[in-house]
Image: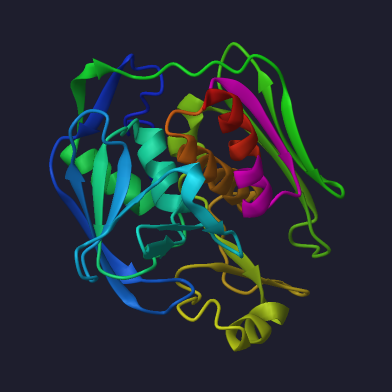
Amino acid sequence: MITASVPTTLGATTQQTLGGTARWSGVGLHSGQWVEVTLQPAPVNTGRQFVRLDLEGQPVIPARIEVVKSTQLATELVANGAGVRTVEHLLAALAIAGIDNVMIEITAAEVPVLDGSAQPWLEGIQTVGVVPQEAPRPAVILREPVTVYEGEAFVSAIPAPELRLSYGIEFPYAAIGRQWCSFTFSELAAAVAPARTFGFAEQVESLRRQGLIQGGSLENALVCSAGGWVNPPLRFADEPVRHKLLDLWGDLALLGTPPIAHYVAYRASHHLHTQLARAIARPMV
């Protein structure tokens, strides 16, 4: 398990990048394709950018809310004629570690799922370290509450003196039921980053027929059935809701520097997460 010694530097006043090059490889959750990812330090004001090494001209895709294309079971970015999917776990890890500027070199159209959490990404970042840069980090201020709804589901951002994320889920499976969790930014590395993605045994075949979860397995996702968890043990008793909170933070990272606020979500999705990010970004343009 990852520990709180992983850098958590939301409060830094200057921009930051990696202290060196870090590499990972693995399978894409939905594509099933093997992919390699290399994180490289980047100059100030670069932001977080994906580079498709496998395509002619190596097009760049900025990790920005403006280029979100799809949110079906993952967040997909498209820019400059290229796309990259399932970016949320990696972006969450970069945001937890306080990495503002980084080039994310990738050899396919989907970020590898690794173990289904953000923990392996944070461990690699911890290995190379975080370096301060000589440029101020933008300070984003949320002046009034922002909420987006979809039926009973919602996501809100509420002005607050410190960053906090709270999330609630409810599923008709006894092993999950209704769960709530709430954490400050400094708690995310230890309490949220290790939480793995999850799915439902009854939906596996249907999703695969749709071309989804081609790389999903019991090694990179928790699977729940009417009878309970197929592949225990869980890392936390409420691991599913913690993972949803991780997804929210990864989607909010598309703002670059999310404003200090209390983010509250209930039965939300990547679609609602990114809608909230768009609503927050609108006054910032």
Looking at the image, how many numbered discs can be counted on the residues? 0
Q: Judge whether residue 3 can be spotted in this image.
A: no
The residue under the point 49% across, 74% down is: 30
Q: Nearer the viewer, residue 262 or 238?
A: 262
Horizontal and vertical percent for residue 12?
A: 34, 17
Horizontal and vertical percent for residue 219?
A: 45, 72
Residue 32 sits above or below residue 269 on the image: below
Q: Judge whether residue 274 can be spotted in this image.
A: yes
User: Residue reaching furthest right?
Assistant: 151
User: Residue reaching furthest top?
Assistant: 161
Quadrant of residue 144 in the image? Answer: top right
Q: Nearer the viewer, residue 236 or 218?
A: 218
Residue 13 sits above or below residue 267 on the image: above
Q: Which residues are magenta?
A: 259-275
Q: Is residue 28 left or right of residue 251?
A: left
Horizontal and vertical percent for residue 29?
A: 46, 71
As for residue 2 lying within the magenta part, the answer is no
The residue under the point 62% across, 53% down is: 270
Q: Is residue 235 left or right of residue 89?
A: right
Horizontal and vertical percent for residue 34?
A: 31, 76
Residue 279 sits above or below residue 125 on the image: above
Colour scheme in use: rainbow
As for residue 263 lying within the magenta part, the answer is yes
The residue under the point 40% across, 63% down is: 83
The residue under the point 46% across, 61% down is: 86
